[in-house]
Amino acid sequence: MLNPLASVAIYGFVFGVLLGGSAPVGDPSRLENFALYLLCGLLPWGFFSLVNSMGMSSMSSNSGLVRRVAFPREVLVFSNVAHAIVQFTIELSLLSVVLLIAGNMVLPWLAPLVVLVVLIAVFSAGFALALSTLSVYFRDLGHLWAIVMQVWFFTTPIVYTPDLIERELPEWAQYPMRINPMHQFVQAFRSLLYDNTWPGLTRSLTLVLTSAMSITLGWLIFSRLSRRLPEEV
């Protein structure tokens, strides 16, 4: 929990104090707290980032095991995903307690929250499967992916509100940011935790389809490239 809290302190100071950012009023929760608004977006992003990072190193950090023992190597990736889920669950539990103290009745939304956690775990696992094998064949992928994640973070409305995109960007630049899957996940988590409302049917279906596509493509890439892992790792 220290990492997201440190991020909240940094981004809260830069965007909330120096740049004068403010959180929207939760609808219908009526909550207005910039730190909690940030946490509701930073925690799912942190989970996605952690799964990516651990997945990318899952083969190389277990190279001896991969070379000498015949076993389903996707187990290494899924064990990291399970570890990240446990940490994510603890973080969300602590956030829920803080939201309750702040007057936000999140208890009725914990069951839908579990479904959302499963969806983002499936979505993230697809990336982790692909990255775990691609990083073995392309050794510098980690440096490139770090840049991709940094750009992806700032093109996702986490430290700023989505309406800033509509105000500041031309229409042609808004479309790729709207279809950004992490945009959809962050807004879904904020709907449940910050606003206390269902994310909506369209967004829910988008998340299901996005997660299914991610795990399918990730598994296909993993299946094709994992055959030569013992030789390449």
Image: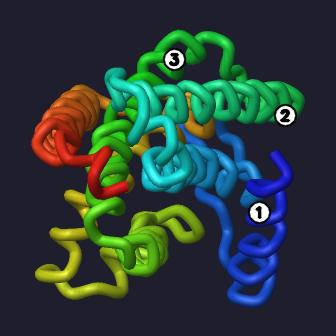
Residue 22, image x, y percentages: 67, 69
Q: Which mark is residue 221?
A: none
Image quarter (top left, top right, bottom left or bottom right) of the N terminus: top right
The figure's colour scheme reads rainbow
Q: Which residue is mark 1?
A: 8
Give the number of the mark in front: 3 or 2: 3
* Residue drawn at 52 percent across, 27 percent down: 79
Q: Which residue is mark 3?
A: 114
Q: Are marks 1 and 3 in contact (CB under 8 Å)?
A: no
Q: Are marks 3 and 2 in contact (CB under 8 Å)?
A: no
Secondary structure at numbered mark 3: helix
The answer for how far apart the CA atoms under marks 2 and 1 are is: 14 Å
Nearer-N-terminus badge (3/2): 2
* Residue drawn at 46 percent across, 65 percent down: 157
Secondary structure at numbered mark 2: helix
Query: In this orientation, which residue lies closer to the viewer: 2 or 79?
Result: 79
Residue 196, image x, y percentages: 56, 28
- Asked if residue 164 can be seen in this view, the reply is no
Q: Amino acid at mark 1?
A: Val
